[in-house]
Amino acid sequence: MLNYLLMFIGLIFVYQSVIFFMKLLKMKKWMAVEIELVDIKVKKEKEMALYTNLMYRYYPRILYKYTINDKIFENTTLSIDEKREWSYKENEILSKVDSIKNVNVAYVNPLKPEQSVIFNFPSKKTISHYVSILIVGLFLILAGYFLPSL
């Protein structure tokens, strides 16, 4: 019974990783379009950290617009990996905002033009997380398969 549970959990891990990597492959085929930056600002969000006082995290919020087939679209999505853009240090985010000001291209899903991102790749940390989840899932499947039935 335990071996089936391990294999089931492993399959869930593998499935989640495969879905993520398939999404990345599809995004590589999205078309690049020129954008107009409408608004960029730094947002401040309260966060309680364990064993410490109240902390704030900062993240850029951007509004951009682009035109596809004479239709104007607006979006605020930076990347598939939204969490990559925040920091506890306001000055780090201010430098990211300055670099985003120079961006003039977004990647648009040709099947759903309202769907776009400025960065069509995740951070190295996110990729390593999904690779780790995939490896753990494979190990769980193998452990469940080779574990004697209990």
Image (cartoon, rainbow, N blue to C red):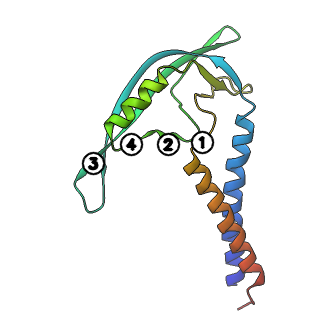
Please state which amino acid type lies under the numbered disc 3.
Met
Q: Which residue is mark 4?
A: 87
- Dots 1, 2 in contact, CB < 8 A: yes
Label 1, residues with CA under 10 Å away: few <14, some 14-19, many ≥20: some
N-terminal-most mark, 3 or 1: 3
Which residue in the protein does label 3 denote? 55
Give percent across and percent down for residue 66. 60, 15
**Which numbered marker is on residue 122?**
1
Question: What amino acid type should be assigned to the residue bearing mark 1?
Answer: Pro
Instruction: First in sequence, mark 4 or 3: give its number.
Output: 3
Compared to residue 144, the image places residue 20 above or below, namely above
Q: Is residue 60 above or below residue 132?
A: above
* Cα–Cα span, label 2 and label 3: 18 Å
Q: On the rendered structure, is 78 left or right of 95?
A: right
Residue 28 placed where, x, y %? 72, 34
Q: Position of residue 58 (x, y in %)?
A: 35, 38
Foreground residue, 75 or 60? Answer: 60
| Of pointers 2 and 3, the one earlier in the residue sequence | 3
Q: CA distance from mark 2 to mark 4?
A: 8 Å
Q: CA distance from mark 1 to mark 2?
A: 8 Å
Q: Name the one closer to the observer, 80 or 121.
A: 121
Q: Rounded to the nearest whole Å, what is the CA distance between mark 3 and mark 1?
A: 25 Å
Which circle's residue, 1 or 2, is located before the other in the chain? 2
Viewport quadrant of the C terminus: bottom right
Q: Looking at the image, which is closer to me, 48 or 139?
A: 139
4 or 3: mark nearer the eye: 4
Q: Residues within 10 Å of mark 3 (few under 14, many from 20)?
A: few
Q: Label 2: which residue? A: 84
- Is residue 10 shown left or right of residue 55? right
- Amino acid at circle 4: Ser
